Amino acid sequence: MSPLEVRQLRAATPGCQSGLVHFNHAGASLPSQATVDAIIEQLQREARDGPMEAGEHGAVMADNARRAAARLLNAPPSSIAFAGSGSSAWNLAFQALGPWQPGDRILVGRHEWGGNLASMQVAVKAGARVEVIPCDASGAVCPLALTAMIDARVKLIDLTWLPANGGLINPAQAIGEVARRHGIAYFIDAGQAVGQIPVDVQALHCDVLKCAGRKHLRGPRATALLYVRPAFLPRLDPAQRDVFSAPWSAQGFDLRNDARRFETSEVSYALLAGLGNALHEINQLGIERVWERVAQTSARIRQALGEIEGISLHDLGEHRSGLIAFNLEGWDGFELKRQLALQRINIGANNVAYTPLDMQARSLPGIARISVSPLNDEGDIEILLNALRALRG
């Protein structure tokens, strides 16, 4: 991306024009004005014409968003469902994979998202076991170690591709190849991947993949994408149903034969209008170019942080994403986040609950987190680094 393109992106984003320095894109990124306008326009339409009456136009925009998501993921539109959050999307698919039996095994990476682990307790109560796949020397999930764990009792392999607590990029495609060879269900939590790095569900060999709209996609909160591989759909029996996901026919209430079996009749078309615009923008920009810019910016920041006395870096893996985990000596991560926010500099902070298996394994009570976007320019970087230098004491 050229400097001119970065300036144009920033000019189209209200947050970048307000004096804010935003390095919390992994928590929630900054929407463009066009995304905000798309939300407001649908709300105005509902106020003017009636909320239900405006639904016809809203449904068209939802279909546009579905096609844009499918393009981004290299998937058919029929394999995309919308949800209210990434966690709810994952949980809907996980619950639909049951019932769980004593002796069933769920294999996860050490970096598994805490919310997914919480959802798995339903299976654990039924007698299933959650087991951790060993890591390789770099700290990434090891496909060879996974292969050695496979037996007939493994019902699910679940991978948090890009963990919330640092820059690790797990080998999602290699894990998918193991799952495919053995015919085991494979779920990917791509909450920090979609919108940051190229995602091709065909190459990943995944059966289910989810992400939130508010993160690197720059969409509104309370939106999420759920991909379900079409051939895998018959294995999923959602507990949540209504007249949309299981419409009435002469034979009774039959589940839809596409991913919309995970949706309901009640939906915010305004939020989907915003998500659709955000998806359109990232498709226009090109995810490969986004990733190139993110990789360059994060490498620049990592190098600079390593030169600041009192800062320790906590990223794993040989290839790293735009999430940077660090601590500043003498500062709790959340207190550091609060102090920087007083200067209108946004970063993130994670405690053990976000990634409990990994944080405990590395004896990390918490970390501060910088996450970058193509929106971040050299001025942002210098403001952040100068603030951290001033706080080191």
Image (cartoon, rainbow, N blue to C red):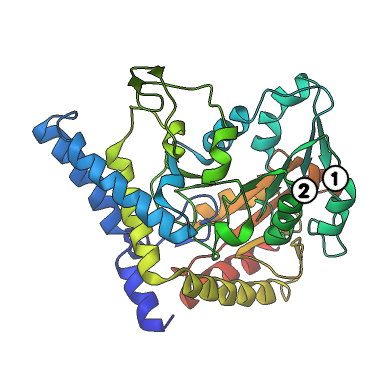
Q: Which residue is mark 2?
A: 182
- Residue 340 visible in the shown view: yes
Q: Is residue 288 left or right of residue 311?
A: left
Q: In the rendering, at what x and y percent does residue 245 appear?
A: 40, 28
Amino acid at pointer 1: Ile
The C terminus appears in which quarter of the rendering?
bottom right
Q: In the rendering, at what x and y percent does residue 339 appear?
A: 57, 52
Residue at x 44% of width, y 32% of height: 261
Q: Nearer the viewer, residue 350 or 191?
A: 191
The N terminus appears in which quarter of the rendering?
bottom left
- Which disc number belongs to residue 150? 1
User: Which of the two labelled residues, at mark 2 and mark 1, occupies the earlier sequence position?
Assistant: 1
Residue at x 54% of width, y 76% of height: 292
Q: Within 10 Å of the Cα at label 1, are there few (<14), some (14-19), or many (20+) other Cα atoms?
A: some
Amino acid at pointer 2: His
Quarter of the view holding residue 389: bottom right
Q: Is residue 176 left or right of residue 386?
A: right
Foreground label between 2 and 1 = 2
Q: Nearer the viewer, residue 338 or 138?
A: 138
Label 2 and label 1: CA atoms lie apart by 8 Å
